[in-house]
Image (cartoon, grey):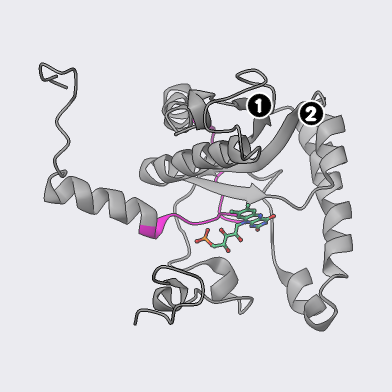
Amino acid sequence: MTKDINGLAPAGPFSDADRAAVYRAIRLRRDVRGQFRPDPIDPATLRRLLQAAHAAPSVGLSQPWNFILIRAPATRQRLHEAFQSANAEAAGRFPDRKALYSSLKLEGILESPLNLCITCDRSRGGAQVLGRTHDAATDLYSTACAVQNLWLAARAEGIGVGWVSIFRPDDLRAILRLPDHVVPVAYLCLGHVTELYPEPELQAKGWGQRLPLDDLIFEDSWNSPPTA
Ligand SMILES: Cc1cc2c(cc1C)N(C[C@H](O)[C@H](O)[C@H](O)COP(=O)(O)O)c1[nH]c(=O)[nH]c(=O)c1N2
């Protein structure tokens, strides 16, 4: 990219086609549980996905993430068992919808060719991090930004991503041998996909619905009426 004399790069809008591609990736990104193909993700593609994650914004440029690539079948088996145990407990938290809950597939730990845990090192950047001085959670938010970057890039690459959060955190810590200062933010299943739901799967299966955007927009304060 060319630089101007102040060291800044041009920042005009993308071309129509490029803009459409960005919005398309956002619109067509899905959480994937059951559509993974078993063929591996080639190293160059995986590298692009990790580069996309690593390009995320982070508080004070602290880049608190690490990427744990999980391929070993024995490790995945243990994680799958940890999921099953937590998921059985979770089903009991929805007594009125237990049958529907239990019918949902909520992970692809064993079917996907790659699992990836994105962690947040809460000590990264030292005791004081610019921008984190008054909100300690901002390192976790930064890590979530990395997850979303990867998720969108993966959609563009034809790689499905599924986020699995139904684990007892101590199980994840023990299996992945995480030190105390490292938080497992996202456990992801990755693999090629040829078909995706056109809408959130949880919507297609009657668990929930996307809320109308206009109901979520306030002006100036929480108590203002919706703008619509
Ligand atoms: C922090 C977090 C945690 C989870 C999820 C997402 C996020 C952001 N999602 C995926 C979630 O169900 C999904 O994103 C929504 O249903 C919307 O669907 P699409 O992502 O648009 O397909 C998810 N899905 C699932 O099957 N098992 C899970 O444990 C989780 N956990």
Pinpoint residue 186: horizontal percent, then vertical percent.
Answer: 65, 41
Asked if 36 appears above or below 139 in the picture, the reply is below
Pinpoint residue 61: horizontal percent, then vertical percent.
Answer: 48, 24
Q: Quadrant of ligand 1?
A: bottom right
The magenta stretch spans residue 201:
no
- Horizontally, residue 74 falls left or right of residue 159, namely right
Asked if 228 appears above or below 11 in the picture, the reply is below
Pinpoint residue 106: horizontal percent, then vertical percent.
Answer: 69, 58
Q: Residue visible at 37% across and 59% down?
A: 27
Locate the N terminus by quadrant.
top left
Pinpoint residue 8: horizontal percent, then vertical percent.
Answer: 19, 23
Q: Which mark is residue 68?
A: 1
Q: Are marks 1 and 2 in contact (CB under 8 Å)?
A: yes
Q: Would residue 74 be visible to someone looking at this image?
A: no
Asked if 225 appears above or below 49 in the picture, the reply is below
Inter-mark Cα distance, 1 to 2: 8 Å
Q: How many marks?
A: 2
| Type of amino acid under label 2 | Leu
Q: Residue visible at 48% across and 49% down?
A: 193
Q: Residue visible at 45% across and 34% down?
A: 57
The residue stretch that appears in magenta? 27-41
Badge 2 residue CB within 8 Å of ligand 1? no
Q: Which mark is residue 168?
A: none
The residue carrying pointer 1 sits among few (fewer than 14), some (14 to 19) or many (20 or more) residues within 10 Å by Cα, namely some
